[in-house]
Image (spheres, rainbow, N blue to C red):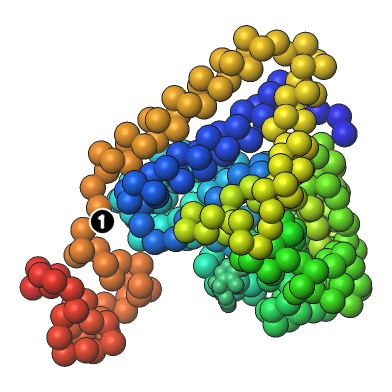
Amino acid sequence: MAISNAKLRELYEQMLLIRVFETAAEREYKAARIGGYCHLSSGQEAATVGATYALDAEDLLVTGYRCHGFALARGVPPEAVMAELFGRSGGCAHGRGGSMHLLDVAVGYYGGWGIVAGQLPIATGLALGLVRQKRQQCVLCELGDGAVNMGAWHESLNLAAVWRLPVVFLVMNNEYGMGTSVERASAVTDLHRRAAAFGLPAERVDGDDLLAVIEAASTLLSGARNDRQAAVLELVTYRYRGHSVADPGLAYRTSEEIAEHVKHDPLNRVRALLSETGVGDDELDAIALEVDQSVATAIAASLASPPPPVSELARGMYAPGSAAQFARMLAGAPFGERELVFAGGLGE
Ligand SMILES: Cc1ncc(C[n+]2csc(CCOP(=O)(O)OP(=O)(O)O)c2C)c(N)n1
Ligand SMILES: [Mg+2]
């Protein structure tokens, strides 16, 4: 896979940003400055950055809830991602989504979805929308190994095949769905082979090999974009941390298993490639410093950003023009409840 040294350096910086961002998010969550859920993607950086890099600027990206890395790789500013984790109005979803529901339509990122496999019908619908609008764009839909046993997987892949929709389903196989290994959950553990049930092309590659990910993702995405050929891409990777920050991640796997994966760390592998092209330790240190600073700036900006005002709670819930319907309802009780449920109400 031919890629310029400058581009490789840039992708390495993105991968390092994700690693440092996730470590900071874990620290902030444990300090109770981040609430709700928080799923980290440390260890999955090559898969995340490589697949996102293979998208064209006009393509659309949809993911599950382990999504900080995808948002960063797609170009959502770190302060907008961090502020969303903090639940602040400066967040990319205005502080109303949190860690699992990042969103930035301006860069073609359509979320960040918390229901396992819930994002598949959304991505499939987006792909149908592209066809209807005669656009030569495609959708990349990320999901976990746990999502391939959900009904929405079968329904979405079937429709994508029958209607020739421009969508690539990216299975991020990190070996576990919460505490359940792929072996315990799936009859066929080569997950990409399930695409055969729908007559779709599929590939399985080492998700910790950045260049292999870019090559496979580029081929499948261009098939979707140019020939409306839906496909499945399975990236075999590993998550270093627990399922969420609340899970130490050691009840269902051993420290030895984790250590074995760390030996093939995706960041080290790209660092080795950079060294071969003559990038020295000085330059690597400079990149690390830049990344540390941008994460520190993101945290400071998040702390300075106010929480979203309660009066904005119903914003985005109703289409423009539905004000008359909304006016009949009690503010803060859009389904007509008689009492306000928020302390202090909505200022009325
Ligand atoms: C429909 C549904 N069922 C159960 C859950 C609870 N749940 C959250 S994550 C998860 C495991 C998913 O694992 P996987 O698809 O492998 O993704 P990963 O966490 O490894 O990224 C489960 C069961 C949920 N969010 N949605
Ligand atoms: Mg998984």
Give percent across and percent down for residue 252. Answer: 66, 62
In the image, is 181 to the left or to the right of 70?
right
- Name which residue lies at 61% across and 65% down: 178
Give percent across and percent down for residue 213. Answer: 80, 44
Quadrant position of residue 182: bottom right
Give percent across and percent down for residue 266. Answer: 73, 37
In the image, is 193 to the left or to the right of 5?
right
- Name which residue lies at 71% across and 21% down: 6
Looking at the rendered image, the quarter that the C terminus falls into is: bottom left
Quadrant position of residue 282: top right
Mark 1 crowdedness (10 Å alpha carbons): few <14, some 14-19, many ≥20: some
In the image, is 330 to the left or to the right of 185?
left
Instruction: Specify the amino acid type for callout 1.
Output: Pro
- Residue 249 can be seen, yes or no: yes
The residue labelled by disc 1 is 308
Give percent across and percent down for residue 267. Answer: 69, 32
- Name which residue lies at 51% across and 21% down: 290
Q: Measured along the vertical axis of the image, is residue 230 above or below residue 49?
A: below
- Residue 122 can be seen, yes or no: no
SS at mark 1? loop
Looking at the rendered image, the quarter that the N terminus falls into is: top right
In the image, is 233 to the left or to the right of 329?
right
Closest to the observer: 305 or 184? 184
Q: Is mark 1 within 8 Å of ligand 1?
A: no
